[in-house]
Image (cartoon, grey):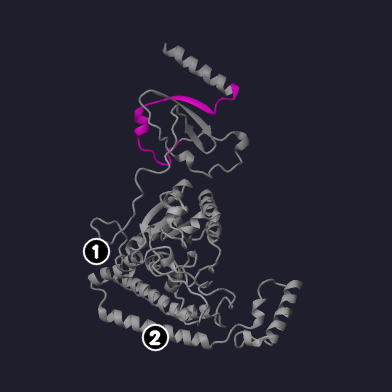
């Protein structure tokens, strides 16, 4: 009987090969084969047909995944040998659920009182690093307060704060290497602050004066610095994500020991660029760390009206990207998650997604009144009870690394430096008129030259409507 079965199996296999039905296989699996652990190197792969041998077949990791269908002993299973990996058939008419029965948990280390939660898994932070991190968080907080006041006084045209999101700024910056290329959204000035961008440089950009590296051609808070590997902020939402995928792939091609790091808000995940960026990075296995600041409201749209999924973290898995949800108001948690994500991105050459749950305490910008779409007591709760700066300070103080005297000295010095920086920025003249047209093209086009002539005539006719020093005679 055994000989007969063996001959029959060979006959069926031969017929299938002859009829081109080898894409569907029938095999008998034992429970031991299914329950044994598999490593990525232990997965068996069939060689590609000769005609496809020249094509790239590593664009998906689906073929590395184990079949999740429960199989009993001696169960007969059919599989579709589809490009990208084998897929089991089932006779059960069942749709995947719209979401898991439980939400993805949120990783944290510090409780609301600044105490380390027992058995927490996190990267140790030295006294020197902790004090520096807290100092930069406090500085960022002060910078937002002073520049916001300056805008309300009419001294600058626009401003946008990071109040409530200081931990994401500073902790992620501390976890990165200076060689990592950052493509920000517009609420990450703390990374520049950490990397050495001075308060005077921040003030120059907000005032658009002669010291502004953008030559006054950008809105305030649209910072950028080649020296600090920090791409200039761009107003259009989520455009930086596919760009980051390209930057990460370039770093990979150049074999650099660095990755691209990009930020986006929860509202930006509704843009097509979010999905294009994640998919491109996943397929090309680009070293990119995607960090989403999920503050619950985008500009003024509550997340319940933004998407039906369990936040952003599950979207990473849909694209085959390793993902984690983090308490964005927990400095140690953000630092640990970004540090490990950066390590995985660089050493394993893969993208990683971090969803940081946080809260934008301030208005979206100086053009917004957030009390129109969220209750004032909610804002107050997050400003006091869940304040990331206060929480981290409690931990630093509990370790004996910080005192009230040091706090008063730090805040006094920073405020003094900020007021001096604003005074210097105000006194510095505006960029010459010609800088509006320089650097656009290597050789100026005809229509651009015509626009320059027209603008000079307009400024000359109505000089009182333009800033002092911004004259048609500038050359």
Q: Is residue 347 visible?
A: no
Outermost residue toward the right in this view: 446
* The C terminus sits in image quarter: bottom right
Foreground: 118 or 328?
Answer: 328
On the rendered structure, is 394 left or right of 342?
left
Q: Is disc 2 placed on a helix, strand or loop? A: helix
Please say if 43 is above or below 19.
below
Task: Tell me which corner region of the image, top left, top right, bottom left or bottom right, holds residue 389.
Answer: bottom left
Label 1 neighbour load within 10 Å: few <14, some 14-19, many 20+: some
For the point 43% across and 63% down, which residue is it?
A: 373
**250 part of magenta stretch:** no
Q: Residue at x 25, y 77 (%)?
A: 403
Q: Which residue range is magenta in the image?
A: 18-43
* Residue designated by label 2: 416
**Residue 459 in sight:** yes
| Residue 270 percent location from the top left of the image | 51, 54
Residue at 27% across / 61% down in the picture?
Answer: 111
> Residue 101 falls in which quadrant of the image?
top left
Residue 115: image tag: 1
Is residue 333 placed above or below 363 in the rendered structure?
Answer: above
Tell me where residue 135 appears, x and y as whole percent.
35, 75
Inter-mark Cα distance, 1 to 2: 32 Å
Q: Nearer the viewer, residue 189 or 376?
A: 376
- The location of residue 224, given as percent across then percent down, is 53, 72
Q: Quadrant of the N terminus?
A: top left
Query: On the picture, is 336 further left or further right than 203?
Result: left
Closer to the camera in the image, 395 or 207: 207
Mark before the other along the chain sequence, 1 or 2: 1
Would you say 113 lies left or right of 260 here? Answer: left
């Amino acid at each position: 009987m055994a000989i007969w079965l063996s001959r029959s199996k060979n006959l069926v296999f031969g017929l299938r090969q002859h009829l081109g039905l080898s894409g569907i296989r029938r095999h008998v699996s034992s429970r031991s084969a299914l329950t044994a652990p598999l490593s990525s190197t232990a997965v068996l792969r069939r060689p590609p047909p000769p005609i496809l041998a020249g094509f790239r077949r590593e664009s998906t990791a689906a073929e590395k995944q184990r079949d999740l269908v429960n199989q009993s002993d001696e169960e007969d299973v059919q599989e579709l040998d589809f490009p990208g990996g084998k897929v089991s058939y089932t006779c059960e008419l069942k749709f995947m659920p719209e979401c898991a029965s439980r939400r993805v948990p949120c990783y944290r280390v510090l409780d609301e009182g600044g105490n380390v939660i027992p058995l927490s898994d996190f990267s140790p932070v030295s006294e020197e690093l902790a004090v520096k991190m807290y100092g930069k968080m406090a500085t960022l907080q002060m910078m937002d307060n002073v520049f916001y006041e300056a805008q309300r006084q009419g001294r600058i045209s626009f401003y946008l704060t990071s109040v409530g999101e200081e931990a994401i700024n500073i902790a992620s910056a501390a976890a990165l290497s200076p060689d990592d290329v950052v493509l920000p959204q517009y609420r990450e000035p703390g990374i520049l602050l950490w990397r050495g961008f001075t308060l005077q440089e921040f003030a120059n950009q907000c005032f658009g004066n002669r010291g502004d590296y953008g030559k006054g051609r950008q809105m305030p808070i649209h910072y950028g610095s080649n020296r600090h590997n920090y791409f200039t902020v761009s107003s259009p939402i989520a455009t930086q994500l596919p760009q980051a995928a390209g930057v990460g792939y370039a770093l990979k091609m150049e074999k650099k020991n660095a990755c691209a790091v990009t930020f986006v808000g929860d509202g930006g995940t509704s843009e097509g660029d979010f999905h294009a960026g994640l998919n491109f990075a996943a397929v090309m296995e680009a070293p990119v760390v995607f960090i989403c600041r999920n503050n619950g409201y985008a500009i003024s749209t509550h997340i319940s009206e933004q998407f039906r999924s369990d936040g952003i973290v599950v979207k990473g898995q849909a694209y085959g990207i390793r993902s984690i949800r983090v308490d964005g108001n927990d400095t140690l948690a953000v630092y640990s998650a970004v540090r490990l994500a950066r390590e995985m991105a660089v050493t394993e050459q893969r993208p990683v997604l971090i969803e940081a749950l946080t809260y934008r305490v301030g208005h979206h910008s100086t053009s917004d009144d957030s009390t129109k779409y969220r209750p004032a007591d909610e804002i107050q709760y997050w400003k006091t009870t869940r304040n990331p700066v206060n929480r981290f300070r409690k931990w630093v103080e509990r370790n004996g690394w910080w005192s009230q005297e040091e706090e008063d000295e730090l805040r006094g010095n920073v405020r003094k430096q900020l007021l001096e920086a604003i005074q210097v920025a105000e006194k510095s003249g505006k960029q010459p008129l010609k800088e509006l047209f320089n650097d656009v093209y290597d050789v100026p086009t005809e229509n651009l030259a015509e626009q320059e002539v027209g603008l000079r005539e307009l400024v000359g006719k109505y000089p009182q409507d333009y800033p002092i020093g911004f004259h048609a005679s500038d050359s």
